[in-house]
Amino acid sequence: MNPIQYEDHIELWEKELKDWVPEKIFDAHVHLGPVEAVGEISPERLKLPLTTFTNLRLEELTAWYEKLYRTKRVEGLIAFPFPLQEVNLETANRYIISIMQKKPEIKGFILSNPKNTRTTVKQFQEALKDGVRFYGVKPYFDLLGKSNYETIMPEFIPRDLLEFMDTEGLILMLHTSGIGMGERANQEFVISIADDFPQIKIVLAHFGRYLKLQHFSDFLESRVLDYPSIFLEMSSVTQSEIYKMALGRRRLWPRILFGSDIPFGLITGVEFYQGETPTFITREHYPWSSTEYSGRKDLTYNTYHVIKAIKDTLENLNLGEEDVEELKTDLFFRNAKSNLLGE
């Protein structure tokens, strides 16, 4: 499925976001990969959110950036393959190597093999021979052939992988299992990584994931974010309440990163929760989404709703204008460029 193209159909960018977003953007969460890296996907698997998009080349991403963030400059990004069990890891990682060779502003993360760390190490070393170095690792539950709710993180993040990452000082881009970081076992696992492998920085994608606000609150009350090596990445988070809780703790400001999750950030919708069931309310119908919502025609690209939520939160922090501008620069650019990557 290709992303649906609109000319900013509710004009959220033109009327509200364009003049507010900083001139420079660093996108800390992007999926890239060629169609030839993907094998056949079964009809049942195609009903899942994960398989909504399966390929996106660099030139297509560049065109989307020009469309989405008009007048702004995306001056860096973290890119990794589509983490599907149907993806050939070697082909997918080779593509990331090839675009890093062309564009030094692309910080590639290797998609790891949860069943055989040796193959991941081998591809890392092959990249070095080709003149580039992976900046981090993207492990993922789907490569085990099981649901996110049927796996635990040590299954797809084995200890020998962590030992290798610590030796190389690599960043871990982590999509958590289960209900996310509100789950005690996940908190303890992330803490164990921070304790045992001090050279690894951890980026918790989608703010660590949660199914309801209480889960995120429980996460904040844990010890996890006491570790300065742990960062929060904001893609898909469209609830201002989440940002309000996080930004209410000033010590976290240097560790919050803007990410789009393109092409998934192009889904026309926002996160939505009914009881214990996570879903998305979307403007257009997807096999996995809900359209039973009267306001869905007010929805646009998910990445716009993420920016809108952070904007609403910052405007209620009671900061001076200069302080707001400084914080925006940190969130959208400097935290990733300097604090995470050390450049």
Image (tube, grey):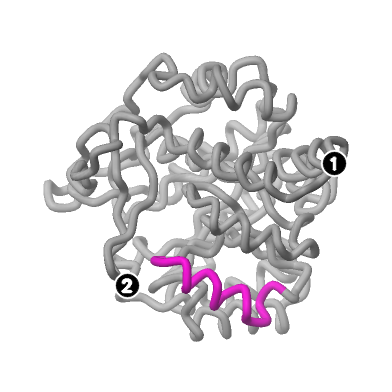
Q: Amino acid at mark 1?
A: Gly
The dot on residue 149 is: 2
* Residue 53: quarter of image: top left
Quadrant hosting residue 166 = bottom right
Nearest-to-viewer mark from 2 and 1: 1
Disc sitting over residue 231 in the figure: none
Task: List the residue tagged with mark 1.
Answer: 320
Give, as a single range, the part of the protein colored magenta: 211-225
Q: Secondary structure at mark 1?
A: loop
Q: Residue at x 81, y 36 (%)?
A: 325
- Regarding residue 119, the answer to whether it shows in the image is no
First of labels 2, 1 by sequence position: 2
Q: Judge from the rendering whether residue 145 lies leftward or rightward of residue 83; answer left or right.
A: left
Q: Residue at x 59, y 17 (%)?
A: 70
User: Quick one: SS at disc 2?
Assistant: loop
Mark 2: amino acid:
Tyr
Based on the picture, tell me whether residue 224 belongs to the magenta stretch: yes
> Is residue 80 toward the left or the right of residue 226 in the image?
left
Vertical arrangement, residue 307 with respect to residue 193, above or below: above
Main secondary structure found in the magenta portion: helix
Q: Identify the image quadrant of residue 141.
A: bottom left
Is 296 inside the magenta-drawn segment?
no
Q: Nearer the viewer, residue 323 or 208?
A: 323
